[in-house]
Amino acid sequence: MATNSASSNPTATTDPAKIDPIRQHHTPAVAAEQNGSEASGKKAKTEKELEKERKKAEKAKKFAEKQAKNANAATAPTSSKAKEKKSKPETKEEPLPEFVEETPPGQKKILKPFDDPLYKAYNPTVVESAWYDWWEKEGFFEPEFGPDGKVKKEGYFVIPEPPPNVTGLLHMGHALPNALQDCLIRWNRMKGKTVLWLPGCDHAGISTQSVVENMLWRRQKKTKYDLGREKFTELIWDWKNEYHMKINSVLRRMGGSFDWTREAFTMDSNLSAAVTETFVRLHEEGTIYRANRLVNWCVKLNTAISNLEVVNKELAGRTLLDVPGYDRKVEFGVIVHFFYEIDGSNEKVEVATTRPETMLGDTGIAVHPNDKRYKDLVGKFARHPFITDRLMPIIADDYVDPEFGTGAVKITPAHDPNDFAIGQRHSLKFLNILNDDGTLNANAGPYIGQKRFDARRAVVEDLKAKGLYVKTEDNPMKVPLCDKSKDVIEPLMKPQWWMKMRDLADDAIKVVKDGQIKIRPETAEKSYFRWLEGINDWCLSRQLWWGHQAPAYFIQFDGEALGDNSDGELWVTGRTPEAAEEKAKAKFPGKKFILHRDPDVLDTWFSSGLWPFSTLGWPKETHDMAHLYPTSVLETGWDILFFWVARMIMLGIKVTGQVPFKEVYCHPLVRDSDGRKMSKSLGNVIDPMDVIQGIPLQALHDKLLLGNLDPKEVANATRFQKQAFPDGIPQCGTDALRFSLVSYTTGGEAELTDMTAGDINFDIKVLHGYRKFCNKIYQATKFVLGKLEEGFVPRASSQKTGKESLAERWILHKYTIAAKDINQALESREFQQATLIVYQYWYNQLCDVYIENSKAIIQDGSDEEKRSAKDTLYTALEGALTMIHPFMPFLTEELWQRLPRRPNDSTPSIVKAAYPAYNKEMDDPASEAAYELVMGISKGVRSLMAQYSLKGEGKVYVQTYDDTSYKTAKEQIQSIKSLSGKGVASIEIISGDHEKPTGCVVFAISSSAAVFLHVKRYIKGRVDIDAEITKAQTKLRKATDGAQRQRKILDDPAYQQRVSKELQEVEQKKLADFEAEIQNYAESIRNFEKLKLE
């Protein structure tokens, strides 16, 4: 007697599934995408094996993706049929005719039969055509309210789309959140709720103005000043209109179920009114105030930016960097030491700086009060070497670290945040030495007009000339760069509008801690708290021409010069100019004045912070605001958690008195295949349309030249494209793109070690594999429809009749469990798990098992059995289509519309169909176990028959080791014979107390059963017995090791206390299976030894 086990010996089976990575991991299907059904020609697998594969998939996502990369090069299955096909000469396929959609726009799609050349196999172009226009025209995406105008009893679900910037085309970083959001939106709509996904775009002040300025210079060699504010703003509106339309076109192609009747733009009239209302209201109560403080000044963009828009570049030492506006690189990462001379004496004091040019703005020198070295200098003055008559007091301040450097610190209050505070404490002069364009002003003395970094070199040379230079040393440091322009940021004094943030931040912390808002994953929540706890006041002003102009007016009294622009008392705000004038009259009764409106615009994030409620009509009292606010979920990237999400929460609570949404889900970032964040400035962004439609490599290169990409980056981007897409990007279609992106997404309830841990390295080979999965769905549905006769009408209900076969009860059980699990996964935002569940149901259970195994019943069963099998096929398939619809909207609509409807079912579209829900009546674990046993037995028979090349002469024994298994095997003997193949002469079921058959090889199924194939009279000359003994010994060792591991787990007291009884039973079953294998392998070795002696 010998034994084989498919679980530990891949060569023991000819089942194609064993060599297909899709069955072992959650990766795209690699299957023939030609005419004819993919659902045919495969053998069934045991559910035990499928369960192992599911667990592998969850634990080995990266390995799965690696397998998928090789998908297109995978070998064909090694079954005999496949070999026969491979040996045949390839027939050249006729090219498909060009597809022309015959459906009038907005009408329901005209479906052609499957024998039409364009419909024989899955074709994304054909499948995705016409549906969206019909969905939109029929109003399927608009929220449905009850007869009373209120939300439906099932509740409401609202997502305000994070508005894409109108700076340019969408990329994969936009495609990911749109796929996730539409998945949730469609799922909740199918659950019967009042659902709204509200679309819109953001004006993106700095980014859009910068893009248009660059475009204007490259095309016309003009600046915005050449056009003037009005003409330049008109040019930006033209840009906005062009790209807004392009953005919406891509969103429609992505299948996004937006309610376009409610589309918003941050500079629409109502959203602008919301900005004005908020600013005026918060200014009136003192939350917004005017102050002359240090800001982050970007010379290139000529505006202030927020701390969140500054990127600190770390340098280990001397480094030359490219700076916009300079032909030669600029030196950073060094510290320059020099002397200041003490007025009235020959004494000197040594100071050091990483920014030598700022010494032109020095107004003091600070030392520590207890530093004895400088005790006698405190109160004296140092002379500036280049600015005549500037004397700088030497002051004592606890801020100074006497152990750092020389212990003496130069103070530049107008150009350094720390010096700013010291300057205030000691009433030092605040001298701004910089013009807005980065040149030096009159306060810089003889350096007036020089560019800041030219002045840096000049100052050092002049210090040397005066004998005041000491040395230059390497100095590790961080250089602040503008995230948009990559220019070096200058701290600069500017009168600006500021918002007090401490009280708002405390309220925002409280609502998350109280559970009014749930932030997922937990790591994002911790980052949220950390940022808000250290928050600073918010600089609202931006020196731009594109955006919401501040509704603030400066008062100039008749006959008087302009007053201090930073004096808040000379400013009024108003919802209209007339309202501002009335405020000014009330503030200064009897005085005549002129009002000058502030030319500055507000930070883009101010208007974006109002998005969840301004889009619903606030400050007006609208129906949407009354019934759909707070919104349900804000789904966004973790990288703008502070830019945007925290500000929405703070402003929402402040102006509406409610949280703006109940949940925040932070998705991972999409990175390129090298792990870099996708960025237009790097040229590594991927246009979703290129993935949906496909694009040659040269066309990808050509697109790099169409935008505003820095010419220096074009060569780098071209190299990246050649490496990542050597053959261009193949056509994948929208459904494959969406499913791939969602399947990549981890997070939900899980905690990541850091927010970047779940980021996605985009790989086109993985995505293209999912197109093959789409074809699997297409061909399976085509096969089932081919088995339903003309005029077939499914039963009115999906409820069981009680006459279902074991196979039917098994698939209905799998269906209801999948429905239960996927609903839970989506509720927990475990997107990857949700795709895994529906993938496994479609691929491993419906296609590879039930559809395969139902063929014999449909062909040879009684009329009653045939009808029952078809009804179950319908239920299982219709449920599979609705289950995967939120991920693949176009393919599922195309196929669902071809299914016959149940009596009295008038559902017009799968968009409105009910989502699968758990049905307790279908939950049948006993039938599941029984059918798993049947499939395991039949698989064992096929495996042994193939291993030992027996055809038409197989004598099989099935030994069962418990009463339930014996009863099942006896009752299902015909199914076992049918599934085992035509080469079996006889199958006999024997009980566990029966003597083990002799002269047989064994296939160990589990602790419940084993398959024995009689080979004694055939084995001589066919099998290397010594090799078989060696194999069995190897398997025996593996089984022994497995049993030892299981015992260690089960005997652990901590495990016994921590893990539920149900899970412990699962692990006990694994141990019993290992022990059964050990027994069989040992017996197998003994029997092979006997065969050697005969």
Image (cartoon, grey):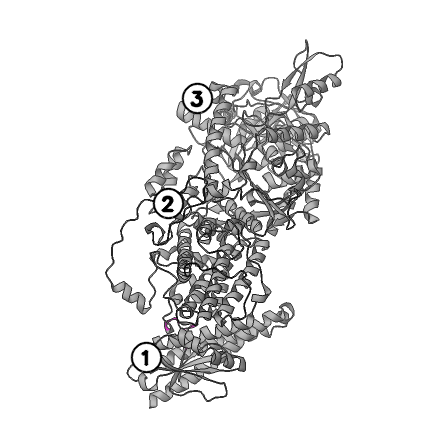
Which residue bears the numbered disc 2? Answer: 694
Part of the protein shown in magenta:
4-11
Secondary element under disc 3, as helix, strand or loop, is loop
> Does label 1 or label 2 sit earlier along the sequence?
2
Q: Position of residue 180 (x, y in %)?
A: 53, 48
Q: CA distance from mark 1 to mark 2?
A: 50 Å
Q: What's the mark number on residue 516?
A: none
- The amino acid marked with disc number 1 is Gly
In-front residue for pair 830/228: 830
> Does label 3 or label 1 sit earlier along the sequence?
3
Is 277 on the left or on the right of 666, as rendered? right
- The amino acid marked with disc number 2 is Gly
Q: Nearer the viewer, mark 2 or mark 3?
A: 2
Q: CA distance from mark 2 to mark 3?
A: 37 Å
Asked whether the viewer can see residue 70, the reply is no
Q: What's the mark number on residue 952?
A: 1
Relative to 792, residue 176 above or below: above
Q: What residue do we see at 34% from left, 79% from top? A: 1027
Secondary element under disc 1, as helix, strand or loop, is loop
Which residue bears the numbered disc 3? Answer: 222
| Residue 457 magenta | no
User: Outermost residue toward the top?
Assistant: 559
**Quadrant location, the N terminus:** bottom left
Relative to 171, residue 948 above or below: below
- The amino acid marked with disc number 3 is Lys
